[in-house]
Amino acid sequence: MDAIEPRFSNDVSALAARFALPGAVAFRSSPLGGIVAELDFAGHRAEVALFGGQVIGWAPARQKPVLWLSEAARLDAGKAVRGGIPVCWPWFGPAAEPGRPSHGFVRTRVWSVRNVQAAKDGVALTLAAPLRPDDPVPSGLDLSLTVTLAHDLTVALTTVNGSSVPLTITEALHTYLAVGDIAAVTVRGLEGAQFLDQLSGQTRTETALLRIGGEIDRIYAHGDGGVTVEDVALGRAIRVDHSGSGSTVVWNPWIEKSVRLGDMAEGGYRRMLCVETANAGGCVVTLAPGDSHTLTAKLSVAAL
Ligand code: BG6
C-alpha cells in the first residue's frame, strides 16, 4: 500500500477510510491535539501519534500503562512530546550545527501512514517520516517506523539510504518507561558496560546493578543484550530488548532539571525512567548508498 500523502495526515476520515481495520486499527482526533492511531490486539492497546511518529501509550491487557507520558504533553504545539517513544534521528543529542533542534528534526513533524496489517499474532502500523529536500540530510533517504502490537510491543525504525552518497547517523528510540517510584527501581543488564556520564563528561564502567537517586544521563556502550527495569512499587519488571543498537541511554532529569524543562508536572520525574535504544555517543551508523539499517526496541512486561 502506498503511504497516504502528508497533506491528508490531518484528515481522520480519509485515514480511517483507507487504513482502519475494524477491531484492530482506528484513527481519531486526540484530546491532546493531532491525530492518533489506536491499535488493539486481544485486549492489549497502543496509541501512536502521527505527530513525531511517536508511540504515546501502551498498556498490555490487565496492566497499567507501561509508557510514561507527561501531563503537559500536547500533540499540536510544534514542540517535541515529553513521553512515550520519541524518535531521535538523524542525530542524537545536541545538533552539530547551531540553530538545529536537539535529537534531530523528525520528532516535531507529522508522519504519514504507509501501511497497516492485522494477523492472528499481532497488529502492525507503519508510518513514514516526511523528509524534505531542504533537510540537512542527502535527498533520497527513506525513514519509516513500524509499531507491532502483540503480547509485547515492538518498535522498529528503518533508515534506507537511497541517496548516492554514504550516510552517517546517530539515533534513538527515546523510551519513557512508567515506574511506580524511581527511587525503588533497579536496572539490570548494564553491569560491566562502559558508559559516558553526560553530566560529568567522564567515561566509567558500571560495576553493579543500577539504582537511581538523582539526575542521571548516561550513554552505555551496550550491544544487543536486554535491559530490565525492576519496579517493586508496581510489582513488575519491564524488559527492553534491542537489535541494531550499540548503545543504551539511561536518563532521568530528577528535580531541578525537570523544573527547567517546563513540560513535566511536579514530581513527574519520580514516575518515569528513560531506557533508550540507541546508536549514540561513540556509536554511529554509516550506510553506503543502497544500504538500510533497522533499530529495534522490543518491550515486554512480567510480574516481579
Ligand atoms: C536524553 C539525553 O536522551 O534526552 C539528555 O541524554 C536530554 O541529555 C534528554 O536532556 C531530553 O532531551 P529533550 O531534548 O527531549 O529535552
Image: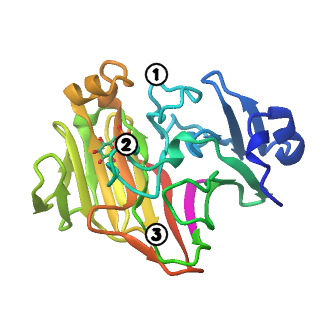
Residue at the image position 71 percent from the left and 48 percent from the top: 112
Going from N to C along the chain, the mark reached first, 2 or 1, is 1
Q: Which residue is mark 2?
A: 99
Going from N to C along the chain, the mark reached first, 3 or 1, is 1
Q: Give the x, y percent position of residue 270.
A: 29, 29
Q: CA distance from mark 3 to mark 2?
A: 32 Å
Q: Is residue 27 left or right of residue 133?
A: right
Amino acid type shown at disc 2: Gly
Q: Give the x, y percent position of residue 246.
A: 35, 69
Cβ atoms under marks 2 and 1 closer than 8 Å:
no
Q: Which residue is mark 3?
A: 243
Task: Give the quadrant of residue 209.
Answer: bottom left
Where ligand 1 lies, by image quadrant? top left
> Main SS of the magenta segment?
strand
Residue at the image position 23 percent from the left and 30 percent from the top: 257
Counting labels gives 3
Task: Give the quadrant of residue 196.
Answer: bottom left
Which SS class for mark 3? strand
Label for residue 49?
none
Q: CA distance from mark 2 to mark 1?
A: 25 Å
Q: Is residue 235 left or right of residue 205?
A: right
Q: Give the x, y percent position of residue 46.
A: 62, 42
Q: Which residue is mark 1?
A: 72
